[in-house]
Image: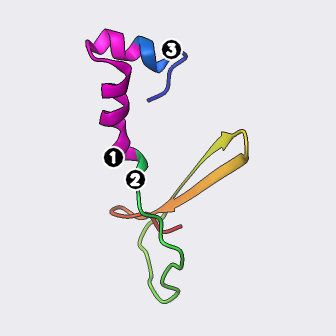
Amino acid sequence: MTSTRSLTEIACDAGVSRWTLDRRFEPLWLIDVPNTPDPNRVYDQIFIDGTYTDAGCLLVAASYDHVIA
């Protein structure tokens, strides 16, 4: 979700508390990232996405059904 609105405002519009909204979003942050991808596996497609944070740029490589690195 991208917006300039705060999570508190979004929670208010949804009719829930900020903590309930945090609990609803929690599963989205619990993605298991593999430490060592299988070097012998061949993928038909790899999706690369990036986002900038205060710590730098986060790059994510994923196949259709799981995170690669």
The quarter holding residue 8 reads: top left
Q: Would residue 7 appear left or right of 13 to someone viewing this image?
A: right
Q: CA distance from mark 2 to mark 3?
A: 23 Å
Q: Which residue is mark 3?
A: 5
The three-letter code of the residue at mark 2 reads: Leu
Name which of mark 3 and mark 1 comes first in the sequence. 3
Looking at the rendered structure, the number of numbered marks drawn on it comes to: 3
Q: Which mark is residue 59?
A: none
Q: Earlier in the sequence, mark 2 or mark 3?
A: 3
Badge 2: residue crowd in 10 Å (few <14, some 14–19, many ≥20): few
Picture quarter with the C terminus:
bottom right
From the viewer's perspective, is the residue at label 2 or at label 3 nearer?
Answer: 2
Front in this rendered view, residue 33 or 45: 33
Is residue 6 shown above or below 61? Answer: above
CA gap between label 3 and label 1 equals: 21 Å
Disc 3 versus disc 1: nearer the observer: 1
Q: Which residues are magenta?
A: 10-28
Q: Is residue 9 left or right of residue 14?
A: right
**With respect to residue 44, does 50 lie above or below?**
above
Dot 1 surroundings within 10 Å: few (below 14), some, or many (20 or more)? few
Tags 2 and 3 in contact by the CB under 8 Å rule?
no
Q: Which residue is mark 2?
A: 30
Residue at 30 percent of width and 27 percent of height: 20
Label pair 2/1, CB-CB below 8 angstroms: yes
Principal SS element in the magenta part?
Answer: helix
Q: Position of residue 68 (x, y in %)?
A: 48, 68
Report the coloring of the rendering: rainbow
Q: Residue furthest bottom?
A: 40
Task: Write down the residue under mark 1.
Answer: 27
